[in-house]
Amino acid sequence: MLSKTSLQVVKALVELSKLPKGRSEGAVSIARKIKAPQNYLGKILQSLAYEGLVVSQKGFNGGFRLAKDSAAITLFDVVDLIDDISGWKNCFLGKKQCSSGTACAVHKHWGKIRDSYIDFLKKTTLKNLRRDS
């Protein structure tokens, strides 16, 4: 259910969550570990630095590190930046008017699935995804 970009970013952030506190890792090294395109991942990580999820440090021992503890960063925090999940309030079938009164054929079912998926993303942290935690 995640886009390819979101999946790569989540994998990259999980790698960053394994670093000792205060340490950084370069985009090239992370890209190799998760088998992602280096330039693309570097640009995405820069955009996450702009959004405040990671810290970017130039120079010797530079690279990226998480801006806060991995237990405080949820999948929703990450995936919503890439895939705009908060915008999933629209009709699944594309109707302009879709609500309880003018519901499409899947309105009730989609709402439950969407809400459950968003709840899962909000409750799952990067720390939860680490194999060593």
Image (cartoon, helix red, strand yellow):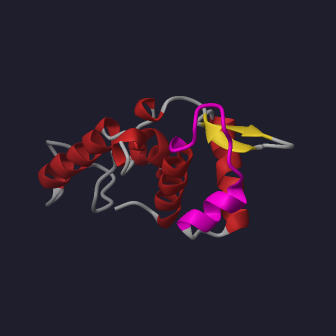
Which residues, given as a range, are shown in magenta?
17-34
Residue 107 left/right relative to 66: left
Which sits in the foreground, 42 or 4?
Answer: 42
Number of marks in the rendered image: 0
Residue 117 left/right relative to 16: left
Q: Position of residue 50 (x, y in %)?
A: 69, 37
- Residue 58 occupies quadrant: top right
Q: Position of residue 91 (x, y in %)?
A: 29, 53
- Residue 36 occupies quadrant: bottom right
Residue 103 seen in the current view: no
Residue 75 left/right relative to 30: left
Which sits in the foreground, 90 or 110?
Answer: 110
Residue 18 located within the stretch drawn in magenta: yes
Residue 129 seen in the current view: yes
Identify the residue at horizontal 51%, vertical 44% (top origin). Answer: 18
Residue 23 left/right relative to 102: right
Identify the residue at horizontal 46%, vertical 35% (top origin). Answer: 70
Q: Is 9 placed above or below 64 here?
A: below
